[in-house]
Image (cartoon, rainbow, N blue to C red):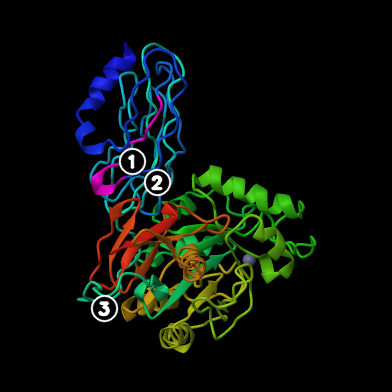
């Protein structure tokens, strides 16, 4: 009974969203197979197909979508029979997406996540695995989705009025630094109280920052939760701030390389409810952390400077990222702003490392006046052509650009298909901005919209992009 009711409920969307329909098998059959990944966004998810099987009292399964940055959670999709769960938190970027389809009585296609705006889709997309019990005929639903065609939460570069490319289809090219001249990330280490004391002023600048927490020293403080809720990155700075050989601990005693990282990771996830984290900072920049970082994180910040900065497609070690360490009493005009000018002129990415903020509690290294840090971030923001963002957002873009820039297109009829695999420990919900010489750019069958700031926004979770004549 349930399956029939479900079918009727879903029937209204069939004309729009059925992608594949297999003839129903009456009675017992094989369990439905998964629908393919559904595309969402404004067009709604495409449905999964299935071989009808036993009636669908238990439903399909799918990988849950993961919300991206700025994404408003979608509702879970539902798949064949009663079961499949689709993009659980992620679907965004358009109107409600309805994925999945019925193929026959007994099951329901996945209902995609309902959308937020401008967010990032769930990664997901194996459709439902068909119902496995019950009566009549089941279908596999399609479940999770990767929403394409939405807008990222990346800041918008100043250039505008750029016409959509109309030349020969092909030649996928990643836009450096999301369309900005350069990039800068402001990071704050050691979970120091003074950073929280002046958090409101820092946050008021309106750019995303990164806070590397010493998990044995963060006190589970509400202030860090506020920072996470405001969209800032909380990164792993180990439990006790030691060298990887156990010496020179700053807070507490060494618990071993694995525990120093993994216990901090667990703490960040449970105390603050954040995914990942995807980046860490090596205490004291000790190189002994690079190898353990590489099996757990996408990025690790060191503690040495490289005035050349990081540049697109360069050979910088992602597990030893350089940074500018704030000097004691450093000012915006006398120090930080020169770094911002530098990334603008060199088209590079630099990272700023701050510790204690005077005149608050001077409990840390190299105290600076918080007003100078606020002035520095404001200066960078107001440049207009400098991308100011968290370390993970800029760093993930940099790493993804290296992957996508190295691709060779495969030919599929008249289409050119670029497919990629993201590096391990890559956050979901990230975008790249790309250009082409011409053609129609699609992901998962959905045409992407040209942005007059000079790019298409490609959903990395989708794993491919197609250029059609
Ligand atoms: Zn530190």
Would you say 198 lies left or right of 114 here?
right
**Residue that label 1 marks:** 74
SS at mark 1 in the image = loop
First in sequence: mark 2 vs mark 3: 2
Residue sitting nearer the eye, 380 or 113: 113
| Dominant secondary structure of the residues highlighted in magenta in the image | loop
Task: Say which mark, if any, is on residue 122.
Answer: 2
Give me the C-alpha separation between circle 1 and circle 3: 32 Å
Q: Residue furthest front?
A: 413
Q: Quadrant of residue 418?
A: bottom left
First in sequence: mark 2 vs mark 1: 1
Residue 85 place in picture, x, y as percent? 41, 32
Q: Residue at x 43, y 78 (%)?
A: 372
| Ligand 1 sits in quadrant | bottom right
Magenta stretch contains residue 112: no
Which quadrant holds the N terminus?
top left
Q: Residue at x 51, y 72 (%)?
A: 358
Magenta stretch contains residue 49: yes
Q: Residue at x 24, y 48 (%)?
A: 42
Residue 174 place in picture, x, y as percent? 41, 71
**Residue that label 3 marks:** 159
Q: Do the residues bearing badges 2 and 1 touch, measured as CB atoms within 8 Å?
A: yes
Write down the region rendered in magenta. Answer: 40-51
Mark 2: few/some/many CA within 10 Å (<14, 14-19, 20+): many
Residue sitting nearer the eye, 431 or 130: 130
First in sequence: mark 1 vs mark 3: 1
Would you say 148 lies left or right of 403 here?
left
Give me the C-alpha separation between circle 2 and circle 3: 29 Å
**Is residue 17 visible to the viewer in this orientation of the structure?**
yes
SS at mark 3 in the image = loop
Q: Quadrant of residue 423?
A: bottom right
Residue sitting nearer the eye, 99 or 326: 99
């Amino acid at each position: 009974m349930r399956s029939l009711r479900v079918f009727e409920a879903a029937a209204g969307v069939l004309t729009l969203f059925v992608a594949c329909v297999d003839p129903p098998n009456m009675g017992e059959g094989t369990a439905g197979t998964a629908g393919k990944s559904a595309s969402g966004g404004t067009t709604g998810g495409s449905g999964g197909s299935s071989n009808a099987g036993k009636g669908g009292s238990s439903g399909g399964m799918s990988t849950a979508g993961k919300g991206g940055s700025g994404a408003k959670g979608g509702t879970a999709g539902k798949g064949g029979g009663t079961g499949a769960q689709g993009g659980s938190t992620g679907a965004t970027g358009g109107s409600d997406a309805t994925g999945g389809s019925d193929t026959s009585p007994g099951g329901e296609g996945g209902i995609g996540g309902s959308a937020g705006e401008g967010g990032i889709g769930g990664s997901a997309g194996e459709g439902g695995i068909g119902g496995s019990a019950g009566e009549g005929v089941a279908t596999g639903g399609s479940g999770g989705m990767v929403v394409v065609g939405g807008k990222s939460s990346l800041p918008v570069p100043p250039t505008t009025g750029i016409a959509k490319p109309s030349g020969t289809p092909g030649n996928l090219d990643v836009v450096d630094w999301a369309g900005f001249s350069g990039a800068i990330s402001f990071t704050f280490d050691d979970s120091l109280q003074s950073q929280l004391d002046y958090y409101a002023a820092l946050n008021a600048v309106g750019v995303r920052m990164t806070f590397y927490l010493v998990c044995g020293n963060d006190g589970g403080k509400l202030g860090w939760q506020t920072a996470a809720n405001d969209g800032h990155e909380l990164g792993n700075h180990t439990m006790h701030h030691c060298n990887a050989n156990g010496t020179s601990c700053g807070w507490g005693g060494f618990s071993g390389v694995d525990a120093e990282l993994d216990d901090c990771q667990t703490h960040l996830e449970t105390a603050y409810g954040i995914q990942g984290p995807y980046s860490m900072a090596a205490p004291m920049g000790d190189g002994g952390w690079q190898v353990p970082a590489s099996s757990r994180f996408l990025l690790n910040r060191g503690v040495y400077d490289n005035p050349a900065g990081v540049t697109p497609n360069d050979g910088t070690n992602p597990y030893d990222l350089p940074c500018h360490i704030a000097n004691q009493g450093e000012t915006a005009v006398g120090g930080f702003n020169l770094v911002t000018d530098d990334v603008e002129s060199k088209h590079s990415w630099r990272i700023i490392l701050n510790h204690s903020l005077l005149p608050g509690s001077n409990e840390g290294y190299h105290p600076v006046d918080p007003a100078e840090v606020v002035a520095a971030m404001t200066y960078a923001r107001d440049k207009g052509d400098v991308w100011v963002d968290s370390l993970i957002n800029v760093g993930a873009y940099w790493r993804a650009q290296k992957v996508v820039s190295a691709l060779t297109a495969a030919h599929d009829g008249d289409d050119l298909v670029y497919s990629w695999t993201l590096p391990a420990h890559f956050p979901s919900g990230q975008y790249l901005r790309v250009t082409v010489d011409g053609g129609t750019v699609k992901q998962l069958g959905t045409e992407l919209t040209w942005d007059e700031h000079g790019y298409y926004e490609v959903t990395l979770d989708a794993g491919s992009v197609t250029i059609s004549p």
